[in-house]
Amino acid sequence: MEHSYKRQVSFADTDAAGVVHFSRLLCYAEEAEHDLLEKLGIPLLDGGGWPRVHVDCDYLNPLGVGDTVVVTIAPESLGRSSVLWSFSMKNNEKVVARGSVKSVRVDASGVAVELDASWRDALAR
């Protein structure tokens, strides 16, 4: 299942060179993930959470203020308590970045817990 999320680059996202700071691209991927989870009815903050345990990203082209970026994200694989997300970002069909983020579902004390069966089903569609 692929999910697309679109946003416009704001001035606050850029660095002194006028391009989006690399760390903001990871925030865009996270926004896309949260948008998908919300649409699927999977809670972000319900006493537990989704910390990131691994990130991999290739930065291919710059973005500037006012550019529109489309983030496409999909669950690449599901573990017992984790989701490996693959993402790509484009501006006018030009690939800006691509990579992956692994998130682990944890309870309120920060201990990894098994993914709920209904969440697993929703993510596997």
Image (cartoon, rainbow, N blue to C red):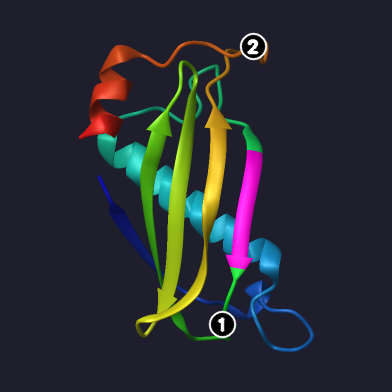
Q: Which mark is residue 111?
A: 2
- In magenta stretch: residue 51: no
- Tell me which residue sits at (42%, 53%) in the image: 32
Residue 24, image x, y percentages: 63, 64
The amino acid pointed to by label 1 is Leu
Using the numbered discs, state the Cα–Cα distance from disc 2 to disc 1 in whole angstroms.
37 Å
Name the residue furthest left.
125
Percent from the top left, x then y, of residue 23?
A: 69, 62
- Quadrant where the N terminus is found in the figure: top left
Instruction: Tell me if residue 56 is in the magenta stretch.
Output: yes
Q: Are marks 2 and 1 in contact (CB under 8 Å)?
A: no
Around disc 2, counting alpha carbons within 10 Å, would you say few (fewer than 14), some (14 to 19), or many (20 or more)? few
Q: Nearer the viewer, residue 4 or 83?
A: 83
The main secondary structure of the magenta stretch is strand
Question: What is the magenta range?
Answer: 54-58
Judge left or right: residue 42 versus residue 124: right
Q: Which mark is residue 63?
A: 1
| Residue at screen point 49% across, 86% down | 66
At 63% from the left and 47% from the top, the residue drawn is: 55
Tell me if residue 25 comes above or below residue 1 in the rendering.
below
In the image, residue 29 lies at what x, y percent? 50, 55
User: Residue 123 occupies which quadrant of the picture?
Assistant: top left
Residue 98's disc is none
Q: Picture quarter containing residue 88?
A: bottom left
Task: Find numbered disc 2 in the image and state the secondary structure of the residue it sits on.
Answer: loop
Judging depth in this view, the residue of 54 and 26 nearest the camera is 54
Which of disc 1 and disc 2 is earlier in sequence?
1
| Residue type of the residue flagged with mark 2 | Val
